[in-house]
Image (cartoon, rainbow, N blue to C red):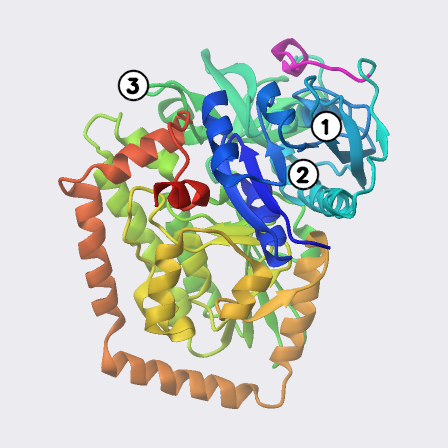
Amino acid sequence: MPALRILLLCHSFNSLSQRLYAELTALGHTLSVELDIADAVTGEAIALFRPDLVLAPFLKRRIPESVWRAVPCFVVHPGPPGDRGPAALDWAILERQQEWGVTVLQADGDFDAGPVWAHATFPLRAASKGAIYRREVTEAALAATLQAIACFAAGDPPQKRAPSADGWRGVLPQSRRAIDWSRDDSSTVLAKIRASDGQPGVVGTLFGRPCRLFDAHLATAAALAGLGGAPGDVLAQRDGALLRRTVDGGVWIGRVSVAIGDAASPIKLPATQAFAAETAALPERAAPLVRAADEWDEWSELRYTERGERGARVGVLSFDFCNGAMSTAQCVRLRDALVELKQRDTQVLLIAGGDGFFSNGIDLNGIEAAAHRDGDSAADESWRNINAMNDVALEIITATDRLTVSLLRGNAGAGGAFLALAADEVWAQRGVMLNPHYKNMGNLYGSEYWTYLAPRRLGADGARALMQRRLPLSAPEALRIGFIDRCVDVPAGEALDAAVREASLLAASYNLRDRVLRKQTERAAHEAERPLADYRQEELSRMHRNFYGFDPSFHIARHHFVHKLPHAWTPRHLAVHREAGAR
């Protein structure tokens, strides 16, 4: 297939856009990115880059006629052929479709109604919109996009034309998302919140205050045991979530979006944090950290189980934090769990992160909320949060009596990507995207012992180059440069089981003892050469300036991120056509 010049036109450089960027670049195509800011800006990008094709994986408005008439434009629509509209996945989840798909079609002036170049389907599992988008939609979009581009490059015609009107469905209104707690069963409540996750949430009330609901999980009979209450009542709390009674059981609501002080717009926070005074007296329905494998259906943020026989045992620790953000409180709970688990008799500790994300670093929403809390500040919460993240990394680095493996089942970014390096080995499912840099968030210096961990893998020059790069890494590319040790080439939903099998072989290997002894010797030598405390102090001295210094770049970038303010321009590391134009 001949190499093409492809301009990615997108509302934001989201996970799907990043995956397509990485995969198409690996195939030899030349790519540049323009964020959809204004028609004139898009036209300027076309003139500068002179693409063979415009690919739009994530847009919120029409491509201008001046563009699609000048250059073929392929739109990646998260629905099967014939489906049209801006909320395709929302409708599919709400209506509990059994199968869904992705269509690549050519823009021709109407929404989702142009010639179809390729499509792919997938079973629609019971999960949140964001989870499905990052996994099934992304994989189907990749397959369909590669097929469409291959046909285009070969000069083949499109497959067919989609219906122009029959499949149109508009925005899913809040009237269809609204929960009737007196009538809706748990599965209906879950479908409504899952169809609204990410954006726009379900409009509702808690404790008499308006809010939007996100991040819902089914409550088990064990969680509800002994609790009364009528449908709609809030009964208990766990890991920042609230247990709310339904007509046939209950659901955990993990996140709500509420107005905080004089904040520019509502902020999405753990439900118990958003309603701290109202929930202070609620009973804590804590779930045990250590549980059997068949007990993992009991939702909680931290879950641990063990596999294998004594002497060849694998401990599996999952931490499933919403959107991968790790607040100070979550980091403290994770650190305490690691301290406890290091006392258990395991030979390999598999640090499995979450199903959707491994980690995305410190919790920017929680930091933004602190800026509007009496007696607190964004700088102070940032400082607490980064120190708590470092405590987690330190517990992993100093687990020298066994082998540790970080498993990335989902994406990782910023400090979360470097947290993974704290383990002896890093494995990632093939579709994972990593953003191992901090600079996009207001030129943060970064911590999590990256100045110790990254050069060990990449060398000093390689680590510096990575931190300046600002572009995402696919798992295969991360493997090639040595950032990770293994690319787990199985479907995302099978990554944990595959990793447990590999970790079990590692735990039973004949040279395990020698590897652990060598690890202890190396760690002692490194500590004698330069203590970990020295790395931490140097990193935090730079972070202190980011948080408390005269340059407000981090605080501005965080504010824009949390409140989803529109981009004013495309960053130059993405819009390479503008760098060329500047020369």
Name the magenta segment's main secondary structure. loop
What mark, if any, has residue 261 been given in the picture? 3
Identify the mark nearer the N-term, 3 or 2: 2
In the image, residue 97 sits, relative to residue 579, either above or below, namely above
- Magenta stretch: give its range: 167-179
What mark, if any, has residue 368 been given in the picture? none
In the image: residue 272, left or right of residue 246: left
The residue carrying pointer 3 sits among few (fewer than 14), some (14 to 19) or many (20 or more) residues within 10 Å by Cα, namely some
The residue shown at (80%, 18%) is: 167
Identify the mark nearer the N-term, 3 or 1: 1
Q: Which residue is under mark 2?
A: 132
Label 2 close to label 1 by CB (< 8 Å):
yes
Given residues 482 and 243, the one toward you in this image is: 482
The residue shown at (39%, 53%) is: 437
In the image: residue 238, left or right of residue 104: left
Which three-letter amino acid code belongs to the residue tagged 2?
Ile
In the image, residue 446 sits, relative to residue 275, either above or below, namely below
Residue 129 part of the magenta segment: no
Which secondary structure, mark 2? helix
Q: Which residue is under mark 1?
A: 93
